[in-house]
Amino acid sequence: MSDLSKENIADLAHDIRRWGNELGFQQIGFSDIELQQAESRLQSWLNNCFHGRMHYMEKHGTKRSRPAELIPDTLSVISARMDYYPEPLCNAANLLDHSEKGYVSRYALGRDYHKLIRKRLAKLAEKIQEAAGEFGHRAFVDSAPVMEKPLAEKAGLGWIGKHTNLINREHGSWFFLGELYTDLPLPPDQSAIGHCGTCSACIQVCPTQAIVAPYQLDARRCISYLTIELKDAIPIEFRKAIGNRVYGCDDCQLFCPWNKFAKPAAEGDFAPRHGLADVDLVDLFLWSEAQWLEKTRGSAIRRIGFERWSRNIAVALGNAKSTPVIVSALESRMPDASDMLKEHIAWALNEHHTQ
């Protein structure tokens, strides 16, 4: 740890916020590493099996909720917020359950945020080191067992809403988070206070009723889990509710009143690519794997692979209004499909045959 006086630490904290803004972050905050309450809530969530098959949520034990166990000598965490919403809210809302279009979660429309934010955090660490000397640190962007939302809440970046996403009072919830674990004794910011009040919009609009109580999400029912995390067949009970959501789900954010304050992101790399913000389902389904690899290069969508991508679109096509074009597209993929994909295509074709 650098040998800095209280005055120097205060000046450094001010500079870190300024550097963060220069690097494209909309907000920087500092927190200590005490997460006892969050640890208790996480354990309760795991005990309820709400994590489904996301076994990584439990495999690291207390390293997730005790930063100094993950990175020894960690004293404070720098949390960073970067906005990503690319368009007016009405554009996305109008696509929900569209009979011909596919809905891709807005965070995945542009380049993968993981590398971009990690590089910016690395540059921030370089600036800190230039000013304060050698210091212990490590950057994280969904890359390790880190409780990013409780840490960001403690750092004043926003509060965890009833849908379990972080909400900022002036900017809504359309933003990414990144963290720098450090051995610097940075002055902690005041923790954000919740402002959800009696609102239950996110609970009411969730297509699969995944928000089973305020601040409690059963991931096994969540469309983001079903279309991204789940590697096997999507349970039949949720297929109709998925509608046209082929990668993730934004409903709880789209209808959150606080997002009326959200502004389009300034980061060019988050702008939609390959027409994914407004794309025809049949066109998506007829992409070859080579086309899919080309059009998802540098995208977070790559993580699910072509089979699961096709699985998701087959479900969306099964929920669409029946047309000869849709039926033909589904039938065309059947001969070469994997067993899992065949199951979903067969389900979709059955939906059309019963219309």
Image (spheres, rainbow, N blue to C red):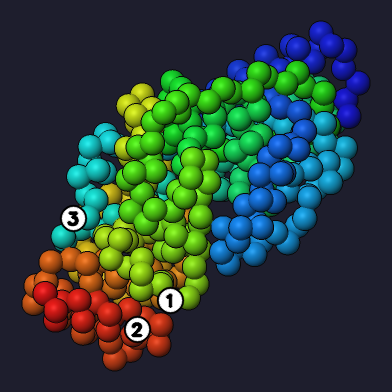
Furthest toward the right, the residue is 3
Which amino acid, mark 3? His
Q: Which residue is mark 3?
A: 98
Q: Which residue is mark 1?
A: 233
Which amino acid, mark 1? Ala
Q: Position of residue 81 (x, y in %)?
A: 54, 31
Q: Position of residue 40 (x, y in %)?
A: 71, 44
Furthest toward the top, the residue is 7
Please name the residue shown 16% across and 60% down the image: 99
How crowded is the residue under tag 1: few (<14 C-alpha within 10 Å), some, or many (20+)? some
Are the residues at dot 1 and dot 2 in contact (C-beta closer than 8 Å)? yes
Query: Element type at marker 2?
Result: helix
Please name the residue shown 71% across and 17% down the image: 13
Are the residues at dot 1 and dot 3 in contact (C-beta closer than 8 Å)? no
Furthest toward the bottom, the residue is 335
Sequence-wise first label, 1 or 2: 1
> In the drawing, what numbered circle is on residue 343?
2
Sequence-wise first label, 3 or 2: 3
Query: Element type at marker 3?
Result: loop
Please name the residue shown 65% across and 26% down the image: 155
